[in-house]
């Protein structure tokens, strides 16, 4: 602190009239009335003066306030605003000039204006007046000032009372200030009371320096410090006496005192010190420089000062640990660098970097690459999850230049790369984490390196443009920027030694040129930000420089100078130009010249900055970023003339062998070096620019083969380095504002690859999941962040936490349940729902106060089974008995949460749950079950856990008993002993009393059903009592009474003060009747629920007694068994009243759905199970889990919640457990849990939003994999995987944890943007069509000379087709042309797609015989279509190859190519004048792979799966090309048609979108399905991926060539471009993942892809077809991007149903509505060139191998009638209206006229009903409702329809969306509800 000031009135006058006065230093003792008091405005020249002072080294300026001028009346409510504004302006001018203000509140005596009112300081009232004044000042200046002095001249006061009152005023003001906020507070005076040291932060003293006195300044200050308790001292006023002019001795003495660390001298007044020197050039630095000689550099002074400061430290003093905290607002961060963690090295077109090239050239350890790294490109959520858990408020990452600009130039902008960083930044901000972005950390685009990289001056402009783009795109969200990270490494290792890429070894020239360009690039980027963005964005731009500390090997001047040179060559090389003067250090330049002279050659060619460049570079940093890892011992080493910094700098570096080593030979643990380096930076650099220091990287590597989780070495390293930073702040006053740990994750560490690990989190690179697991260092760093340093956490002091008081003190008494209960309405409501209604996903959110939680239980997670006095539980006893638990597992250690609850808190914070449900271990608190055995260590554990939860706003939900009864109580029969009721109550009482001030949600018991039945009936769980007939009922009786007693204890003793909730957590499955139409089965399902759920809930929520169904059943059974009374105990009336209403909310655990059926079991066995007269089984559509008894069937949850609502008076419900088990092989990638959570939570959402169930919270089971009772550790329910084989029990988030966090963050399932509907229209002339295929509809299989097809043969082969169906008749379309055309007219299509039967025209497949009758059929059909103004779209081949050709090899025989060309010639020549739209081949994939690989379609070949599909595909492509060329060459000019192929493909999403392996699998799926045929048509050949994979696998299997045939160059040329459009069939989406088929040689093995479906997707009548509309838009975009934006005709799209016919096919309407809307988005928003849409299919027909079971048609074909009548379904009207509107009219514009269908003609009326229950409708016996639907559909096509408008009505919120189409294409987005 170098002080000047204060301003005087005279000096202000001089400033106004003399411009040179601003370059003077007024000195001398000031009178009180001479101090500037803001009676006049501050002149503009003051800014020049302050800047002059700053250039002279002044850091602080005294500002003397006028108490009276500020508060003329003494009242803080009546300030003089102009005076206040004047002082604020003065303070702002100082701070903006880089000088900190030191505010003097008052001099001494009372102002004259106040003295007349109050007298002097002898009046004690003055103290309060002064305190009010001080408080006013603090409030007004708190944003600008952090250092104050109360009194500057206390010695002027007279009399002890004045002094005492003034001193007391100081004390009061000091306390006030530190109550309001923290800062520096001092007192200036000569003498002080003994206890002054308790009430000052520093002592301001007046001193006189007398040159004639021999006592040294050091001695005087030391003596003063001894008397004032080692407090910091500021020489507030220093006067010079008896010294000659220009005598520098006072200045040197002061500087010596400032350097001495033994005295705590904060600063000194230098006004007279410098004023005594030459006014023109004197400054602190220059004076000191002259003292050491003109040749000494500035840095020498800085280095010497730091060296002298620390040289005398003993190792003990040096390493002394400083307990304490960092300043408030200190910033903590963790970091990564792009190429080390991102992976995705070619994803979405990312450019190659120099590190990609380096790795691929084999220059990295073990030939490792960064291709995948941590896969952070796909795992943004994973990384941010860890940051949340770690409480990191900042995250520093770098942007990959080549991911944003692949070539390094802005013209190559890659939007996908840009969006990745946008997602990362947004995700960080959503979690409250500030992003810090490094623009370049070593990974230069290779394209720039190809032109010289950093040696090419043009790169400066390229980097400037890159920085400009990043600032413009991200700057509104990113407020801290590093231009470069450790650029010295690039210069030295990249271009000097060549150890890093680009591997250039040129230390003499290139290394220096690189630095030169990097510095200029940095400066240009800084100026771009400063000039264009700073004003609006308000961020900071700096640079992160790396440096070791250089410690001289000895005290010799030579070694000290060598150490200084080392720092100049490493740090000063970059820092000096930027932070000092725009140029390289003089010492560096001088040394290079010296070596040139000495060696006679240029060992280093240092470029020169122009004067303009120096000005541009100087000061271009808002902070000093420091990356520091280690220190070096430096000695002088002269005489070498080799290139390189060591030789040029004449120094040599060494390592002290006593320094602790790390996995890197370059990094040793030398923490004290950091403090010294920080002092050096503060002295040499930041004192010039007055910017803070950010430690932007500090960390150490460990070896991979060491203990990867328990990284105690890193913990010690970080602890000591962070502590040194704190010392630098507190002991040295270095302005450090941030500490960043390198690195968040293990990563790719350059040449060392993955052999060295810097991460706080272990990344398992051997797993394709690249899971992240916190190490011990992550938990340590979390603790540092939490404590803001190292101070022990103060005992948590929580103010009274408010609970949720019950609105009513008592639940209403409800009548007992009927038999069956009235809640059977739930089955009536839901069980008749269609599958579509049941599974339709509901989008919406829960209320804001919905409570999201996660759970565990004590025995399952805590471990510590006998730790700290815990008593044994009955589970301890049970598991220690051999043979009881799978694999002999126990809960002795479990997850070790007893010792690792902080790690659990880490995961809870990362999840951001609102609540954590856990249970108390009774024997941990009362080891023998009784209060007398109280174990305070157990209590302390739960107190710490509860306090930790509340500190992070996580509500504790506490279960008092979760099955782990103290063994001592079980020894007296446990829950079968009525005494336990009171014992349990005493335990609860203690818990309420001890924890209830913080716990507001209590559950007495978890799943009492399990305790009673499984523990005392079946005896499978402890206490293993097998007494199924009576013990369960007695135990349940006691449990209910124990619960009620505990509830009443809380109610009477604690509720009023604690205001919590008390309940019991019951378990229930949903039971669906075997047949909902049979009352007895409904009663059985109801009975199952009463016995399981009602057993405990009926007494509590209804009337205090068991359900009548239960009493009736057990009573009757008991009587039939000859018992005198029921085995079910009875409650007295008092007990009923006592039990009723003993729950404030309903807590439910539920996992599965079962089906119940009525049975009469044997009577001889007394059993709770047999008492129910039911049997249960799994429901048909449930999904297996790792526990066979808990199959997943989500729809049961909604029904169960509704049943509870109906049965128990609609209580508030909390789901307290719900989850799914996976087996031990499933670690972190758990798709089954993903599907479970998505479906179960959505059913809960439906119950809440649609059914008005009062659901208040959802708790997932469980937080961690844990001890799962009888299954031990063989299954896991956790959202976090726990490695039970490792002693540290590491916890790793699973993918499901990220999903659950997302659900919590979104508070449910808001409608995804991709599902939002759009309103607009398809282009004019859009093709609307419906499709069929010849074999599926024509029939007439032997009529009029038709030849046999392969499908005729296939369907007449046993076991090939479901139900032995055939196409012999099919829909008889061969004879029903008019009926088919009428259907098309009803649909209002303008096109009809049908296929021609090859054997109907050419019976043997060749042109030897042309069947004219077959041709005539197609002539008639085409003519009928044209007459109806419907254009034909003709498919030449839709799978029905003539059998004659199959007999000679079919598509495997390449002669078929010519046969197909001949067949096409016949058709083109005969029909081409009428047909203008041709499809050569339909779905060649199915022909090739399904027909010739799997063999499930004709011709049924499956025994050559490795070759036949590829040969067939090859010939199909060539056949298509020949047909296309035939038409092109022979017919196009005359006929004017278009020809293409129809290719089918699903869309593939990665099963795990966070996993590169699954993303690659999805890509392979697409390449092998759509690309198999599209790539040759559009590019001439198969894709490289397909060719390479098949070739490599073929050769590996010993084949000489690839199994995939090759096209000749001539064939490539002939095939390429054989398309006039892209014909596309699409139905669904799959989830893809890698599936290794080992050495199997077939299509699937080559593709290496497994597929699954998301269970939340809607089903259809076909197992393979799920309703996934967004995939349609994605695959249309894929075609556009992959194949050059061709015109696309969608030639098939539709959905099936199965089972009983329902003409009200709402599922089909839903399908078309959503798929067509996605197509519209692709057209209007994405610019996909969609020309037409064809629905599959016109009518139900033969669906190949499934026969007539699956129905896709708009029209139902009644096969029970010989005439095969076509009956319209409701979807007919919908599709006709869609066509009529040519899209989606905006409903907010009102009904559109297109939604009213014009009449098509007169229809015949339906036949009258045959009976009240059955109607004959067009030959079909249907129910009256179905007939009504069909009639309405028909009428809507003949009369002005009104139904269509209703079908297209939406409840919407309008959102505008910009169109990529011409302006007249208006689009509006709507949101569904």
Image (cartoon, rainbow, N blue to C red):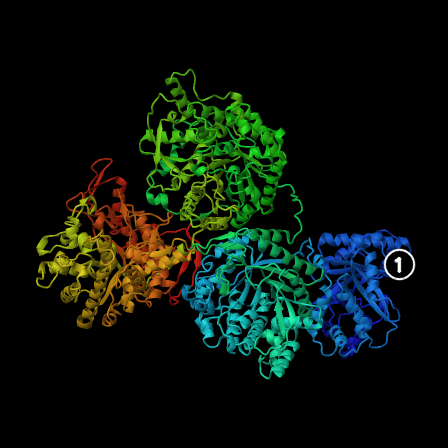
Location of residue 596 with respect to 1029 vertically, above or below:
below
Write down the quadrant of residue 959 in the picture.
top right
The residue wearing badge 1 is 157
Residue 830 rendering spot, x and y as whole percentages = 36, 38
> In the image shown, does 293 or 1236 lie closer to the viewer?
293
Residue 880 rendering spot, x and y as whole percentages = 49, 34
> In the image shown, does 1315 or 1250 lie closer to the viewer?
1315
Left or right, residue 183 beside residue 1680: right
Task: Looking at this view, name the residue that lies furthest to the right.
Answer: 159
Residue 1655 rendering spot, x and y as whole percentages = 37, 47
Location of residue 1119 with respect to 1853 vertically, above or below:
above
- Number of on-image labels: 1
Write down the quadrant of residue 14 in the picture.
bottom right
Task: Estimate how packed mark 1 is, as few (under 14), some (14 to 19) or many (20 or more) residues with alpha carbons within 10 Å.
Answer: some
Q: Is residue 1431 visible?
A: no
Residue 1551 rendering spot, x and y as whole percentages = 39, 53
Left or right, residue 732 beside residue 1851: right
Q: Secondary structure at mark 1?
A: loop
Q: Quadrant of the N terminus?
A: bottom right
Q: Is residue 875 visible?
A: yes
Write down the quadrant of residue 285 in the picture.
bottom right
């Amino acid at each position: 602190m170098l002080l000047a000031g204060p301003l005087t009135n005279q000096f202000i006058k001089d400033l106004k009239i003399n411009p040179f006065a601003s370059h003077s230093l007024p000195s001398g003792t000031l009178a009180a009335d001479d101090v500037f008091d803001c009676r006049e405005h501050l002149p503009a020249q003051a800014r020049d003066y302050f800047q002059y002072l700053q250039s002279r080294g002044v850091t602080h300026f005294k500002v003397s306030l006028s108490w009276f001028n500020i508060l003329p009346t003494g009242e803080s409510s009546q300030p003089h605003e102009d005076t206040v504004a004047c002082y604020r302006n003065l303070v702002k001018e100082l701070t903006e000039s880089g000088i900190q203000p030191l505010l003097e509140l008052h001099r001494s005596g009372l102002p004259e204006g106040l003295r007349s009112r109050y007298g002097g300081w002898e009046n004690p009232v003055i103290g309060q007046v002064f305190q009010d004044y001080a408080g006013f000042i603090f409030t007004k200046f708190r944003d600008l000032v952090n250092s104050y002095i109360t009194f500057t001249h206390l010695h002027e006061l007279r009399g002890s009372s004045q002094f005492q009152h003034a001193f007391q005023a100081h004390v009061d003001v000091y306390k006030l200030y530190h109550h309001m906020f923290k800062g520096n507070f001092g007192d200036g005076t000569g003498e002080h009371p003994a206890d002054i040291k308790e009430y000052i932060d520093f002592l301001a003293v007046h001193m006189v320096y007398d040159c004639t006195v021999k006592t040294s300044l050091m001695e005087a200050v030391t003596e003063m410090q001894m008397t004032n308790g080692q407090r910091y001292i500021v020489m507030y006023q220093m006067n010079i006496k008896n010294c000659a002019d220009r005598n520098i001795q006072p200045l040197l003495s002061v500087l010596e005192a400032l350097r001495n660390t033994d005295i705590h001298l904060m600063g000194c007044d230098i006004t007279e010190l410098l004023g005594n020197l030459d006014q023109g050039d004197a400054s602190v630095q220059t004076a000191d420089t002259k003292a050491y000689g003109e040749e000494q550099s500035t840095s020498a002074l800085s280095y010497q000062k730091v060296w002298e400061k620390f040289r005398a430290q003993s190792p003990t003093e040096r390493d002394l640990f400083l307990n304490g905290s960092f300043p408030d607002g200190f910033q903590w961060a963790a970091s990564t660098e792009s190429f080390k963690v991102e992976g995705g090295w070619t994803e979405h077109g990312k450019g190659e970097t120099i590190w990609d090239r380096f790795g691929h050239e084999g220059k990295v350890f073990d030939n490792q690459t960064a291709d995948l790294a941590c896969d952070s490109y796909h795992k943004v959520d994973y990384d941010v999850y860890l940051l949340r858990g770690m409480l990191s408020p900042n995250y520093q990452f770098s942007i990959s230049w080549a991911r944003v600009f692949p070539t390094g130039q802005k013209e190559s902008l890659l939007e996908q790369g840009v969006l990745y960083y946008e997602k990362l930044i947004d995700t960080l901000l959503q979690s409250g984490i500030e992003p810090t972005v490094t623009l370049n950390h070593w990974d230069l685009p290779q394209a720039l390196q190809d032109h010289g990289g950093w040696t090419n001056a043009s790169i400066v402009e390229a980097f400037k443009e890159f920085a400009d783009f990043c600032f413009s795109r991200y700057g509104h969200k990113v407020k801290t920027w590093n231009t470069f990270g450790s650029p010295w490494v690039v210069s030295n290792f990249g271009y000097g030694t060549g150890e890093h890429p680009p591997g250039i070894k040129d230390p003499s020239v290139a290394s220096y040129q690189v630095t030169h360009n990097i510095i200029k690039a940095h400066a240009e980027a800084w100026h771009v930000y400063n000039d264009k963005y700073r004003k609006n964005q308000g961020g900071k731009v700096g640079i992160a420089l790396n440096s070791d500390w250089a410690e001289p090997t000895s005290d010799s001047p030579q070694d000290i100078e060598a150490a200084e040179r080392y720092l100049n060559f490493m740090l000063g090389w970059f820092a000096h130009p930027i932070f000092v003067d725009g140029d390289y250090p003089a010492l560096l330049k001088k040394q290079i010249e010296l070596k040139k002279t000495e060696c006679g050659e240029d060992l280093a060619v240092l470029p020169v900055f122009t004067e303009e460049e120096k000005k541009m570079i100087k000061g271009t940093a808002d902070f000093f970023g420091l990356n520091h890892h280690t220190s070096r011992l430096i000695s002088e080493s002269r005489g070498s003339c080799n290139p390189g910094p060591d030789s040029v700098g004449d120094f040599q570096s060494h390592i002290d062998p006593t320094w602790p080593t790390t996995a890197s030979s370059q990094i040793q643990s030398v923490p004290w070096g950091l403090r010294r380096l920080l002092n050096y930076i503060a002295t040499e650099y930041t004192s010039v620019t007055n910017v803070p220091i950010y430690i932007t990287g500090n960390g150490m590597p460990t070896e991979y083969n060491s203990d990867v989780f328990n990284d105690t070495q890193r913990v010690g390293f970080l602890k000591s380095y962070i502590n040194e930073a704190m010392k630098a702040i507190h002991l040295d006053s270095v302005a450090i504002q941030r500490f960043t740990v390198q690195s968040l994750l293990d990563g790719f560490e350059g040449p060392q690859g993955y052999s060295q690990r810097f991460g706080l989190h272990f990344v398992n690179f051997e797993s394709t999941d690249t899971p992240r697991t916190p190490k011990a260092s992550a938990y340590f760093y979390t603790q540092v962040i939490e404590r803001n340093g190292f101070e022990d956490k103060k005992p948590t002091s929580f103010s009274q936490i408010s609970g949720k008081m019950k609105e009513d003190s008592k639940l209403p008494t409800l009548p007992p349940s009927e038999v069956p209960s009235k809640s059977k309405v739930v089955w009536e409501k839901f069980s008749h729902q269609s599958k579509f209604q049941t599974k339709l996903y509901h989008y919406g959110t829960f209320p804001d106060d919905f409570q999201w939680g996660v759970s565990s239980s004590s025995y399952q997670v805590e471990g510590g089974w006998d730790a700290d006095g815990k008593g044994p539980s009955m589970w301890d006893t049970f598991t220690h008995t051999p043979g009881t638990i799978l694999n002999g597992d126990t809960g002795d250690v479990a997850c070790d949460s007893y010792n690792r609850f902080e790690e659990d808190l880490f995961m809870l914070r990362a999840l951001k749950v609102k609540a954590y449900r856990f249970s108390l271990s009774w024997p941990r608190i009362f080891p023998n079950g009784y209060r007398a055995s109280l174990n305070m260590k157990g209590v302390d554990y739960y107190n710490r856990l509860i306090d930790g939860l509340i500190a992070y706003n996580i509500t504790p939900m506490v279960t008092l008993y979760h099955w782990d009864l103290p063994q001592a109580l079980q020894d007296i029969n446990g829950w079968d002993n009525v005494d336990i009721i009171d014992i349990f109550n005493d335990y609860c009482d203690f818990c309420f009393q001890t924890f209830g001030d913080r716990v507001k949600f209590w559950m007495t018991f978890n799943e009492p059903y399990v305790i009673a039945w499984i523990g005392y009936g079946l005896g499978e769980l402890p206490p293993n009592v097998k007494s199924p007939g009576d013990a369960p009922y007695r135990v349940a009786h006691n449990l209910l009474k124990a619960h009620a007693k505990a509830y009443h204890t809380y109610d009477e003793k604690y509720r009023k003060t604690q205001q919590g909730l008390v309940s019991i957590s019951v378990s229930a499955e949903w039971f669906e009747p075997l047949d909902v139409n049979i009352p007895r089965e409904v009663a059985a399902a109801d009975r199952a629920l009463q016995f399981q759920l009602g057993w405990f809930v009926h007494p509590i929520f209804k009337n205090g007694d068991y359900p009548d169904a239960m009493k009736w059943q057990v009573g009757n059974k008991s009587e039939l068994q000859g018992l005198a009374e029921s085995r079910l105990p009875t409650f007295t009336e008092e007990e009923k009243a006592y039990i009723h209403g003993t729950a404030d909310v309903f807590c439910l655990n539920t996992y599965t759905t079962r089906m119940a059926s009525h049975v009469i079991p044997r009577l001889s066995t007394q059993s709770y199970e047999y008492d129910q007269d039911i049997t249960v089984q799994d429901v048909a559509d449930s999904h297996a889990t790792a526990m066979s008894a808990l199959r997943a069937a989500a729809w049961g949850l909604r029904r169960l919640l509704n049943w509870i609502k109906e049965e128990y008076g609609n209580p508030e419900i909390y789901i307290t457990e719900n989850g799914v088990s996976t087996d031990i092989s499933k670690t972190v990638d758990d798709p089954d849990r993903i599907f479970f959570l998505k479906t179960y939570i959505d059913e809960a959402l439906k119950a809440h939003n649609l059914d008005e169930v009062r659901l208040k919270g959802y708790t997932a089971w469980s937080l961690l994999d844990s001890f799962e009772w009888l299954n031990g550790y063989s299954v896991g329910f956790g959202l976090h995987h726990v490695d039970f084989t490792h002693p540290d029990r590491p916890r790793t988030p699973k993918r499901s944890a990220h999903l659950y966090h997302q659900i919590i963050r979104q508070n449910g399932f808001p409608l995804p943007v991709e599902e939002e509907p759009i309103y607009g229209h398809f282009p004019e002339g859009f093709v609307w069509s419906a499709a069929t295929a010849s074999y599926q509809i024509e029939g007439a299989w032997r009529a009029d000379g038709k030849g046999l097809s392969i499908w005729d043969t296939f369907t007449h082969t046993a076991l090939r087709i479901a139900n032995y169906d055939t196409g012999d008749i099919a829909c008889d379309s061969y004879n029903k042309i008019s009926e088919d055309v009428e259907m098309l007219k009803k649909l209002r299509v303008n096109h009809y797609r049908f296929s021609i039967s090859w054997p109907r025209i050419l019976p043997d497949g060749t042109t030897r015989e042309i069947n004219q009758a077959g041709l005539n059929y197609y002539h008639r059909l085409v003519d009928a279509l044209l007459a109806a103004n419907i254009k034909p779209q003709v498919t030449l081949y839709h799978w029905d190859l003539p059998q004659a050709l199959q007999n000679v090899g079919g598509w495997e025989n390449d002669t078929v190519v010519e046969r197909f060309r001949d067949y096409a010639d016949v058709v083109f020549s005969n029909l081409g004048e009428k047909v203008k739209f041709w499809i050569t081949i339909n779905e060649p994939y199915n022909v090739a792979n399904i027909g010739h690989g799997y063999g499930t379609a004709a011709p049924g070949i499956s025994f050559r799966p490795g070759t036949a599909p590829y040969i067939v595909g090859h010939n199909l492509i060539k056949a298509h090309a020949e047909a296309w060329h035939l038409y092109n060459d022979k017919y196009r000019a005359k006929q004017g048609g278009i020809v293409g192929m129809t290719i089918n493909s699903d869309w593939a999403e990665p099963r795990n979108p966070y996993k590169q392996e699954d993303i690659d699998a999805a890509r392979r799926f697409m390449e092998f399905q759509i690309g198999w045929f599209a790539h040759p048509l559009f590019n001439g050949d198969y894709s490289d991926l397909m060719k390479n994979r098949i070739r490599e696998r073929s050769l590996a299997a010993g084949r000489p060539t690839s199994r995939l045939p090759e096209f000749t160059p001539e064939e490539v040329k002939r095939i390429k471009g054989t398309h006039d459009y892209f014909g596309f069939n699409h139905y669904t989406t799959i989830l893809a993942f890698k599936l290794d088929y080992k050495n199997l040689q077939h299509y699937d093995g080559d593709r290496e892809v497994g597929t699954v479906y998301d269970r939340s997707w809607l089903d259809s009548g076909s197992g393979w077809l799920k309703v996934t509309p967004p995939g349609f838009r994605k695959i249309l975009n894929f075609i556009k991007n992959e194949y050059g934006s061709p015109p696309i005709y969608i030639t098939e799209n539709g959905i099936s149903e199965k089972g009983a016919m329902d003409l009200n096919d709402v599922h089909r309407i839903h399908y078309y509505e959503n798929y067509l809307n996605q197509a519209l988005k692709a057209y209007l928003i994405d610019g996909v060139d969609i020309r037409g849409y064809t629905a599959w299919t016109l009518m139900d027909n033969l669906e190949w191998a499934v026969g007539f079971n699956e129905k896709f048609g708009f029209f139902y074909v009644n096969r029970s009638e010989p005439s095969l009548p076509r009956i319209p379904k409701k979807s007919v009207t919908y599709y006709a209206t869609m066509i009529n509107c040519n899209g989606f009219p905006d409903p907010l514009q009102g009904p559109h006229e297109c939604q009213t269908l014009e009449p098509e003609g007169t229809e015949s009326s339906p036949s009258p009903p045959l009976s009240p229950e059955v109607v004959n409708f067009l030959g079909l016996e249907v129910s009256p409702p179905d007939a009504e639907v069909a009639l309405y559909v028909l009428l809507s096509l003949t009369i002005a329809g009104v139904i269509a408008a209703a079908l297209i009505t939406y409840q919407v919120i309008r959102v505008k969306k910009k169109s990529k189409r011409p302006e007249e294409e208006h689009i509006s987005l709507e949101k569904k509800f």
